[in-house]
Image: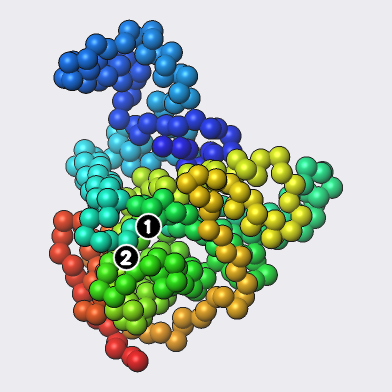
Amino acid sequence: MESHHCRQSTSKDYFEPVWLTFNSLYRFYESECKNNDEIPLSYKTFSEVFKSLNISLFLPKKDKCNICCGHSAGNVSVEEYNQHVSKNIKARVEKEIDKTGVGGIHAYNMDLQKFHLVPSLNTLAVYYKTKLLVHNFTLFDLKAKDVYCYLWHESEGRITSNEFSSIVCFFISSKSGVNSNEIVNLYSDGCTYQNINSTLSNAVFNLSQEMNIIVIQTNLERGHTQMECDNMHSTIERKLKNREIYTPASYVNICKSARDSPKPYDVMYANHSFFKDYSDLSFVSSIRPGLNVGDPCVTDIKAIRYSSDGIHVKVDFEGEWKILPTKMVW
């Protein structure tokens, strides 16, 4: 995987922290070769090839998971760590299955890229000038590898649940190609103001009723939320390197030209009329699975399912769907 938080300072790819030393990685490689009746490379040759691929064994500190680091330091119990690893594996398996498109599922992951500044110039005097923030919310088609970017600046919209709900609903209804009775699965991190909140749930549930479809939101395990969207962000940031930006609209052309194959990114430059206010929708006032102290909270949700049967949530991938009480207001 690419670095999640350090893409500007490194172009390396990184392994997940499975092997603690290069020697253990080489021993694993040797055993795999023997299992496949292949002759392994020598340690020296393996090391040279590894370096030539621009791969690193150790993640940057900013990318490391708090629970994994806590376990290494002896501050997190083995039981809690094993549950954490199990949740990560289950989420990844779900995503890999949806990549194949089995069962006609339309699968995407989505994330907000870090903000950009306008103007962005290599001039000291500009450093002290007031600048506009430009936001880029991206979706990636796991099967077709298509990329969708939605850009706007802070004069046209904020970064609240209404903005993200507007983009998600527009994308599902206009870009996903989903038909009646089909399933859309959206993978994301656990950011509450973006992906796990009652505003987005009300908006998507309303859309699922109008289109007669099933929408599932799947949240990856905290600390292991690397997605294909991150590769898109990395590609865009490399295209921005040493570029001078004078207007927010300049980012549109840069995003479009960031990739040529298999095809350029689909980019939409949104203004204030694009974003909707979903405060009038009140199917649910809260999406918290529990009500009492000690019950699961919003950040414990692993999946949300919107359909004609209502809104259901899971706090474990292998658990049962639990229905949320909804107000059927039409």
Looking at the image, which residue is at 52% across and 79% down?
A: 276
Q: Quadrant of residue 237?
A: top right
Q: What residue did someone put label 2 on? A: 184
Tag 1: Cα neighbours inside 10 Å, few (<14), some, or many (≥20)? many
User: Closer to the N terminus: mark 1 or mark 2?
Assistant: 1
In the displayed structure, 19 sits above or below 112; it is above
Q: In front: 317, or 266?
A: 266
Crowding at mark 2 (Cα within 10 Å: few <14, some 14-19, many 20+): many
Q: Secondary structure at mark 2?
A: strand
Q: Is residue 90 visible?
A: yes
Give the residue type that dot 2 points to: Val
> Residue 116 shows which numbered tag?
none
Work out whether 165 lies above or below 89: below
Kindly indicate the quadrant of the structure image that contains residue 174: bottom left
Q: Which residue is rendered at x = 47% and y = 46% of the image? A: 262
Q: Quadrant of the N terminus?
A: top left
Q: Where is residue 295? Give x, y as percent.
A: 23, 65
Q: For the image shown, how many numbered marks are present on the structure?
A: 2
Coordinates of residue 200 in the picture (x, y in percent) = 41, 72
Point out residue 207 in the picture as x, y percentages from the top left corner.
37, 78
The residue at the far bottom in this view is 330
Name which residue lies at 55% across and 45% down.
260
The colour scheme used here is rainbow
The spot of residue 142 in percent (x, y) is 36, 52
Circle 1 residue: 108
Residue at image position (31%, 20%) is 25
Q: Secondary structure under badge 1? A: strand
The reply to whether dot 1 and dot 2 touch (C-beta < 8 Å) is: yes
The amino acid type of the residue labelled 1 equals Tyr
